[in-house]
Amino acid sequence: MDEYEYIEGEHGDEFVLNTVRTLFSVLRRLGTLRRRFKKYQTLFKSTNPAFPASYNSLLKQLVADIFDSTLTDIPDIEFHSAGLKDYIKTGFSLFMNVSKPQPRDNSTVFIIILGGATASEIKFIQETAAQHKEHEVILGCTSILTPRDTLKDIGLVVKELMNENFEDDE
């Protein structure tokens, strides 16, 4: 029974209603944060109105764009100069039409994911790396997420926020 201990004990309707409200508040906040992105504001892709939209993770969108040679700029990735050569190149971009360096310009691409990656995201990165043999792709993540882990993490966040709300009421 310990795997279902997200909400412990018996609770009334008001507690359950407040928990659901807190969950949706968390989801709304996440949606608000996504609006800051220029390109990656949605996780759903609809190619045809006759078919339902499909899930397209942020990681999959980023990796696809990193290795898309037709893109000259990835607006949500910032470049920070690593040396004199890069500094001069970005400095000239103020006066001339010089594109900033892209992650795919390097022979090794590091992808670090804080919070974990799903098995399908890892598989997508492996497949993408296999298609781009001129690049070495190194993936690091804090954990491999399962659906159960995701639900547990959401439950823990909601539980923590519920505890804060009850402490504020006292």
Image (tube, rainbow, N blue to C red):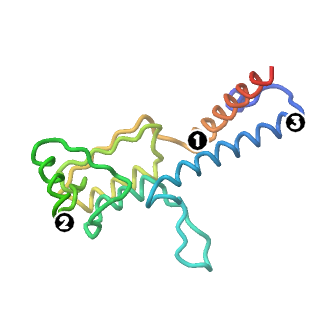
Q: Which mark lies nearer to you, 2 or 1?
A: 2
Quadrant of the frame with the N terminus? top right
Whole-Å distance between the Cαs marked 3 and 2? Answer: 60 Å
Residue occupying image coordinates x 72% and y 25% = 163
Where is 63 relative to 50, above or below? above
Q: Which mark lies nearer to you, 3 or 2?
A: 2
Local crowd size for mark 2, using a 10 Å CA cut-off: few (<14), some (14–19), many (≥20): few
Where is 159 relative to 45, above or below? above
Where does the image place residue 129, in percent across and percent down from the top left?
A: 28, 56
Where does the image place residue 133, in percent across and percent down from the top left?
A: 20, 58
Q: Which circle marks residue 14 in the picture?
A: 3
Query: Which mark is first along the chain, 1 or 2?
Result: 2
The amino acid marked with disc number 3 is Glu
Residue occupying image coordinates x 21% and y 61% = 99
Q: Which circle marks residue 150 in the picture?
A: 1
Query: Which mark is first along the chain, 2 or 3?
Result: 3
The amino acid marked with disc number 1 is Thr
- Residue under label 2: 97
The amino acid marked with disc number 2 is Asn
Whole-Å distance between the Cαs marked 2 and 1? Answer: 44 Å
Relative to residue 9, is residue 2 drawn left or right?
A: left
Q: Nearer the viewer, residue 122 or 48?
A: 48
Relative to residue 154, is residue 129 drawn left or right?
A: left
Relative to residue 14, is residue 80 drawn left or right?
A: left
Where does the image place residue 119, in percent across and percent down from the top left?
A: 46, 48
Query: Which mark is first along the chain, 1 or 3?
Result: 3
- The picture quadrant where one finds residue 19 is top right
Where does the image place residue 139, in percent across and percent down from the top left?
A: 32, 43
Element on which disc 3 rests: helix
